[in-house]
């Protein structure tokens, strides 16, 4: 069996570039379907499974694609006859663009469910408000758009996929559509900028409002995909967890402000540079409560595990937001207690000792164990090693590039 030997408490140092933001690429792939002439060219595209699967979906629709991994360039030409195909739940973000181009789209219920799920239901409500006809037939929901007109929406806990799909329809809809309280997300800002470059008329205000004047046609354009800001934030967290000194190239403060404010409140030093963000960690971390804005950002398991490790190093008692599945795994290794508020747990630090041998049974448990082992000054063995790669294949390689002492051993 393979296991990882992790030398904890070693400060990470150096600079690191992250790949293109996956969500932005997916949204731009959807936007490419709206161009009836010309080619949409994306640069800085990572070859993730979701992006590759969407490429296949676009080709099945009838678009012509050329992806060049060596140059990270994706060229998409949808100026042909497109044939709509049923969309599974993971491809619902394409629904708006297909409806706008083909005037019909079919959504398939989530597996083992009798309905579309929360995101699919919200999307259907939005498209119906724009004038689409919604018809349910068995496990499929068919939307048709004979006549679409503008509408005013207030974005309340919509997923980015729902926002993107609704925005695509609004771009080619008669009249004016207004989106209020739009979250400050890279995927939304970037796809709006691309659509405007393609000929759309979308005005973005400081009050997080989008005003969309519908147009008849869009054309091709080129776009450089923003760096993955979630990934950038994760490596800033890694620097804080290990009291390191790391520059994350391509990190944008505007998207990471809640995290940066929190890291500074803990005692770290944040330096905004022209090419990224530098985090200089501290050996003494102050116990600091996570602000609500940070809780909204840290929904991925990788972020939650990293934040938990940061709390484990803080001097005193602090509150950390965790889903029950992550908290359950961590309780075996940490002085973690429940609080009165849901998903909030008390951590008493600093934690100075972990079990030398950490046996894990599933990927989430492996991720939590790995981040804790990075934070605590001791040698820790994590087994089996393969589980860590299942949840985040690139994490270990990137941390090794920053000087993490992690080696693979066999027994």
Image (cartoon, rainbow, N blue to C red):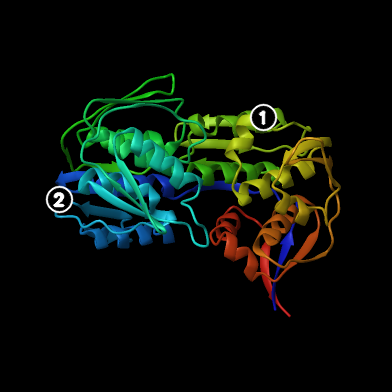
Are discs 1 and 2 less than 8 Å apart at CB?
A: no
Residue 144 pos. (x, y %) = 26, 46
Q: Which mark is residue 79?
A: 2
What is the x, y in percent for residue 36? 15, 45
Kind of element beneath mark 1 = loop
Residue 69: name its quadrant.
bottom left
Q: Which residue is mark 1?
A: 291
Look at 38% across and 36% down and name the residue there: 126
Residue 354 shown left or right of residue 295 in the figure: right
State the count of labels.
2
Q: Residues within 10 Å of mark 1 (few under 14, many from 20)?
A: few
Q: Is disc 2 surrounded by few (<14), some (14 to 19) or many (20+) residues within 10 Å? A: some
In the displayed structure, would residue 350 be above or below residue 91? Answer: above
Q: Residue at x 19, y 44 (%)?
A: 35
- Residue nearest the viewer, comparing 176 with 17: 176
Q: Which of 62/380 is in front?
A: 62
Residue 253 in percent (x, y) is at: 51, 31
Q: Residue at x 56, y 41 (%)?
A: 233
Q: Please, is residue 340 above or below residue 75 in the view?
A: above
Q: Front-most of 42 and 362?
A: 362
The Cα atoms of the two marked residues, 1 and 2, are separated by 46 Å
Res 164 label: none
What secondary structure is found at the residue carrying circle 2? loop
Q: Quadrant of the N terminus?
A: bottom right
Rendered position, 344 above or below 204: below
Q: Quadrant of the C terminus?
A: bottom right
Q: Is residue 122 left or right of residue 75?
A: right
Of the residues under marks 1 and 2, which one precedes in the sequence?
A: 2
Residue 44: tell me if it is visible.
no
């Amino acid at each position: 069996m393979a296991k990882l030997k992790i030398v904890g408490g070693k400060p990470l140092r150096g600079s690191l570039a992250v790949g293109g933001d996956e969500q932005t690429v997916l949204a731009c792939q959807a936007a490419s379907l709206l161009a009836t002439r010309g080619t949409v060219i994306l640069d800085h595209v990572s070859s993730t499974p979701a992006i590759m699967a969407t490429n296949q979906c676009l080709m099945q629709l009838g678009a012509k694609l050329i992806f060049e991994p060596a140059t990270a360039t994706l060229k998409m030409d949808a100026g042909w006859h497109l044939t709509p195909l049923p969309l599974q739940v993971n491809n619902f973000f394409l629904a708006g663009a297909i409806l706008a181009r083909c005037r019909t789209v079919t959504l398939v219920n989530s597996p083992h469910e009798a309905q579309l799920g929360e995101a699919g239901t919200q999307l259907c409500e939005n498209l119906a408000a724009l004038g689409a006809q919604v018809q349910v037939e068995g496990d499929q929901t068919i939307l048709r758009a004979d006549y679409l007109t503008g509408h005013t929406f207030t974005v309340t806990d919509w997923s980015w996929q729902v926002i993107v799909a609704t925005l695509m329809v609004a771009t080619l809809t008669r009249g004016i559509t207004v989106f209020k309280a739009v979250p400050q997300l890279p995927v939304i800002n970037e796809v709006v900028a691309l659509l405007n470059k393609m000929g759309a008329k979308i005005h973005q205000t400081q009050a997080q409002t989008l005003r969309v004047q519908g147009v008849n046609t869009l054309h091709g354009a080129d776009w450089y995909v923003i760096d993955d800001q979630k990934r950038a934030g994760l490596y800033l967290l890694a620097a804080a967890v290990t009291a390191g000194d790391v520059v994350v190239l391509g990190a944008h403060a505007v998207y990471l402000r809640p995290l940066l404010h929190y890291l500074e409140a803990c005692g770290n030093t944040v330096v905004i540079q022209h090419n990224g963000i530098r985090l200089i960690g501290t050996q003494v971390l102050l116990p600091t409560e996570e602000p609500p804005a940070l809780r909204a950002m840290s929904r991925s398991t990788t972020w939650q595990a990293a934040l938990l490790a940061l709390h484990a190093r803080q001097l005193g008692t602090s509150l950390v937001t965790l889903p029950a599945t992550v908290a359950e795994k961590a309780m075996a290794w940490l002085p973690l207690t429940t609080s009165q508020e849901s998903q909030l747990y008390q951590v008493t630090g600093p934690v100075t000792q972990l079990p030398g041998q950490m046996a894990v049974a599933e990927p989430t448990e492996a991720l939590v164990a790995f981040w804790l082992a990075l934070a605590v000054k001791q040698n820790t063995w994590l087994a089996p090693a393969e589980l860590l790669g299942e949840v985040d294949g690139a994490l270990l390689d990137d941390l090794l590039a920053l000087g993490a002492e992690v080696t693979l051993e066999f027994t």
